[in-house]
Image: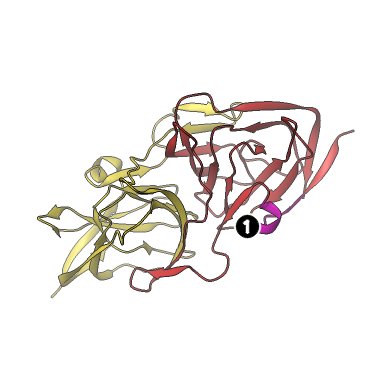
Chain colours: A yellow, B red
Amino acid sequence: MTRTIRARPLDGAAFAPFGEVLETAGPPDRMVNAGRAGRWHDRADLDFGPGGRAGISIFRAESCSLPYRFDLLERHPDGSQAFLPLSSAPFLVIVAPDEGGRPGAPLAFCTAPGQGVNLRRGVWHGVLTPLAPPGLFAVVDRIGPGANLEEHRLAETLTVSA
Amino acid sequence: MTRTIRARPLDGAAFAPFGEVLETAGPPDRMVNAGRAGRWHDRADLDFGPGGRAGISIFRAESCSLPYRFDLLERHPDGSQAFLPLSSAPFLVIVAPDEGGRPGAPLAFCTAPGQGVNLRRGVWHGVLTPLAPPGLFAVVDRIGPGANLEEHRLAETLTVSA
């Protein structure tokens, strides 16, 4: 028997304990480009710690489908990590609260087109799980010394359902 | 009579004088996520100057079509600016070399799906010009004091053709 969690639509309020949803929610903070574009300004709480700096990397990940089974979570103790999809395809965002240095009960969110996320430093999360090709993401995270990675294998496999 | 420039496919070598093309060119620098994803590592030459820091903002811009006419270029003297499309739709990237504090002859590039760009600090460029909806971009640029904007109106309107 495996425990099942349901993927809920990604929503800034529900996601707030883990980081920020990066999207055009509400009116733009300002208009730019001679009025042709809106800017939702500085929406991620970036944190690269002492000795780190911001970098942009590109990820290409294998797609998955629901129901999706997983038993691996990871976290980056030294910096935040933002995932910006380079397509309109949805992706799963699996996160978990920390409970004494180990992940507590995971939650799963499914993005809408135009949504990215920024994970706060140290937030437990699943691997990149696009729900359709091309699986391309720009990732804004910490460049600096150290491994900046902790992995945790769950005692039981969990299933994310639609 | 207006001068016409042709949009060429965006290519890292041709774009190098202006910044970096952010894409999955060549093999990944490393595999992550238990082998499920490739990482093209730290591909942008980010530069936020003294007194600045990295931020992620979301832009939504009106779409345009070819032939596209323009007479406005701008640049950001205090920091680099990366444009990461949140869709697979192509966009135009118009840039110009600097000639004594004014833009020289502009060039136009058309992106392929999965391509973003990072503009070096101070590079003259056109406004955001997605070639199809939704016109959504994540923008990684400098957050800090100062206007960080110079605009230049061209003496003649230019046309970008396919």
Residue occupying the point 24% across, 52% down: A122
Q: Residue furthest left?
A: A100
Q: Name which quarter of the figure residue B74 lies in.
A: top right
Q: What residue sits right under mark 1 in the picture? A: B112
User: Which corner quadrant holds the C terminus of chain A?
Assistant: bottom left
Which of the two residues, B133 or A55, is positioned nearer the viewer here? A55
Q: Say which element carries label 1.
A: loop
x 54%, y 63%: residue: B24
- Residue at the extreme top of the image, as rendered: B146
Quadrant of the snapshot with the N terminus of chain A: bottom left
Q: Where does residue B8 sit, x and y in percent of width and height?
A: 74, 53
Amino acid carrying mark 1 in the image: Ala
Task: Using residue A6 as the reference point, say whether residue A57 is left or right of it.
Answer: right
Point out the stretch of residues depicted in magenta.
Answer: B7-16
Asked if residue B9 lies in the magenta stretch, the reply is yes
Q: Position of residue B142 (x, y in %)?
A: 48, 36
Q: Given the current orientation, which residue lies at the most extreme right position?
A: B1
| Residue B48 among those drawn in magenta | no
